[in-house]
Image (cartoon, rainbow, N blue to C red):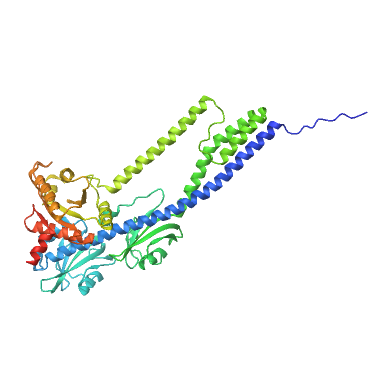
Amino acid sequence: MVNPIRPRRGFKLSSIISFVVILSVLITIFISTIIGYNTERKSLFNNTIEMNGIAALNLSKTTESLVISMQKSLKVTADYFSDIELSDKNVLSQLDFFMGTSPYFNSLTIVNSDGVIVSTSPNNLNLIGSTPTSEATLESLRLKKPYISKPFHAITNRLIVMVSSPIFDRNGNYKGFVGGSIYLQQANIFRDILGVQSSTTSGSYFYVVDSSGNLIYHPDKYRISDNMSDNPVVQKLLQGSSGSQRVINSEGQNFLAGFAPVPAAGWGIVSQTPQEHITDISANVIQEMTKFSAPFVLLLVILSFWLSRKLAHPLNRLATYASRLSSGDDSLKPMTSDASWNYEANQLVDTVALAFNKLREQKEVLHAEANTDALTGLTNRRTMGAITTLWKQQGTPFSVILMDLDHFKSVNDRYGHHMGDEVLKFVAGVMVSEKRPDDYCCRFGGEEFTMLLPHSSEEEAVLVSERIRLRIEQSVTPIGESVTMSLGVASFPDVSDEVFELFKYADQALYQAKRDGRNRTVAFSSLQSMARI
């Protein structure tokens, strides 16, 4: 008797197909995830370290301009006192004027050649007549030339950096120096220009060190004056180098740092981001990829059981779909032609497009905020520097007009800073209405404004200056009365082929207008003519 063949149970074809499909999808997702993670991490690493290098370089240029402007401001002050007897009653009011018109320093001090403090502004420090013994004071007296100190504790026990400029009379005799103090652990010009850094999701921040590696600017004010010379990046800065690299800080944390020197002061700027931030972002990308993929994986599991009953046709569709999925085809459509699926796909595309549009709009807003003055809407000082640098590189001739409202402090004192701001916005509106399409109106700082006129001679710039001056003088401002302004004009390259010198000469013309009685325009060429006479 022949034994019947017992049927082999085995696995159902539908189960095999489903298993193969699920396994293929999971492997594809796993490989795509690993590749995506490594690619994203490498890209973020390179972009972050490059952006920190660019940020450090831009900040160094900003700080360089700031230091040069500070030194110029002190030089103008020192020149003013060159032929004035240095006594408190002689210099106090003018020192207060310079303090009120200069945004750079927390206080100004005049020390005579004997090392005695003659006057201070603000005059609430009770230091007049005292003899400071700080290394900064002694070094300024010894050098008899412009000097920037290391951080030190002053007589008032404040941690400061002092910038000084010597005072010589017309015969070249040394009379002392005028020193501007920056209170490092209080509100100061660095925080105004570089910004107060708040905590960020990335943990990024930047700091400034002096020529000895001492911190003079840091988001943690209690770390200011700490010595960072053992940091590899700071060591390169002290050698005058710039660039970007990975660095381990004193607490053993890995950072992606960019660094650039500030030659005018011998300082250096470091912008850095924790490396763990890159790892966290990459991990978040994987999590988002997993969340995004999970519904599709579940859908494929369900579809696999249904497709297994269709054998060849469903298998072919499945292979095609898996191939396109693994290749990352952005045009991949849902597997069924159900209208509801098409609707969902359209909604997803619309949502992604909306998200990118919002991102672009946000980028445009941030770009505008970075390049314009928040109060007046005019071009800010940083962008003004970029424009003039580009024009110099291109050999474009241009004229610069420096404007300063006369006695603006009295407007703020009498009507309040809110109405003072309204006056500034009014002046900005007049400037914009008088400019040509290619001209730039800029806010230089405080009540100071600048106009850049490409392809304009000094004579043309003077005509524009006078139009603006007369309109301001003849107009009723938001405070119900008119105000006046003084203006200085200089042209590139007629006066100078260096941008910083051009602004210096325009500033000298502006101060001459102040000295001549205010409410007038002075061209630098007229100063040169007077000097020759």
**Vertical side of 51 occupied by 300: above or below:** above
- Can residue 183 be seen in this snapshot? no
Q: Nearer the viewer, residue 229 or 332?
A: 332
| Apparent side of residue 233 relative to residue 145 in the rendered image (left or right) | right
Q: Nearer the viewer, residue 235 or 29?
A: 29
Q: Nearer the viewer, residue 69 or 127?
A: 69
Query: In the image, what residue occupies the spot 56% across and 44% down?
Result: 32
Among the 4 quarters of the image, the one containing residue 385: bottom left
Place of residue 381 in the rendered image (x, y in percent of width and height, measured from the top left): 24, 52
The quarter of the rendered structure image containing the C terminus is bottom left
| Apparent side of residue 460 relative to residue 7 in the rendered image (left or right) | left
- Can residue 319 be seen in this snapshot? yes
Query: In the image, what residue occupies the spot 17% across and 65% down?
Result: 75
Query: In the image, what residue occupies the spot 38% across and 49% down?
Result: 200
Place of residue 189 in the rendered image (x, y in percent of width and height, measured from the top left): 25, 56
Place of residue 100 in the rendered image (x, y in percent of width and height, measured from the top left): 15, 55
Identify the residue at the far right of this view.
1
Place of residue 240 in the rendered image (x, y in percent of width and height, measured from the top left): 35, 66
The quarter of the rendered structure image containing the N terminus is top right
**Vertical side of 424 occupied by 135: above or below:** below
Q: Nearer the viewer, residue 88 or 305?
A: 305
Numbered label tally: 0
Among the 4 quarters of the image, the one containing residue 304: top right
| Apparent side of residue 13 relative to residue 72 in the rendered image (left or right) | right
| Apparent side of residue 330 relative to residue 422 in the rendered image (left or right) | right
